[in-house]
Amino acid sequence: MKTARRRAREFAMQGIYEWQLNPDRVASTIEKHLRENDYFAKADEALFRTILFGVLKDVETLSAMLARHYERSPDDVSPVERAVLLMAALELTQHQETPYPVIINEAIEIAKTFGGTDGHKFVNGVLDKLAAEVRPEEFASGRTRRQS
């Protein structure tokens, strides 16, 4: 059973993906298109809107932050993986109330559902590095707990 927050993230990722393929399309048009899905009513609308509109507003900054942690050219990152990474990067940088392991786990699960065979491994590696950069105290305390 998917939570309303998982559904919101999935729809936001799909919206980001759609925007990547149609960069001239405005966010409100993408949102309208996604709302036509029967399952949209079960999503956390506020989280969906925050992620979709936040990513599209800050895509250049978020992309630059992520690219520092790629072990390949940004052009070689699939649009699905890029959409998942952008979604998670926004949450890691702007939603301190959500623990970073939750954000990373959600991104991994969404990458498993929508992405290529091993895309989730790439997503995990990049987000681990980004979390260490943007949430150093939380990341360090989480690493300490995992090693105990």
Image: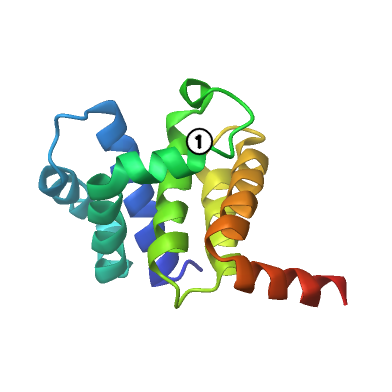
What residue sits 35% from the left and 44% below the top? Answer: 61
How far across and how far down the image is residue 41, in percent? 25, 66
In this picture, is 112 found above or below 100?
Answer: above
How far across and how far down the image is residue 51, in percent? 31, 58
What residue sits 45% from the left and 73% below the top? Answer: 96
Which image quadrant for residue 122? top right
What residue sits 70% from the left and 69% below the top? Answer: 140
Q: Which sits in the foreground, 130 or 84?
A: 130
Secondary structure, mark 1, is helix
How far across and how far down the image is residue 133, in percent? 58, 56
Residue type at mark 1 is: Ala
Residue pushed farthest right?
148
In this picture, is 46 found above or below 90?
Answer: below
Residue 35 as seen in the image, left or right of residue 6: left
The residue where tag 1 is placed is 67
How far across and how far down the image is residue 119, in percent? 61, 36
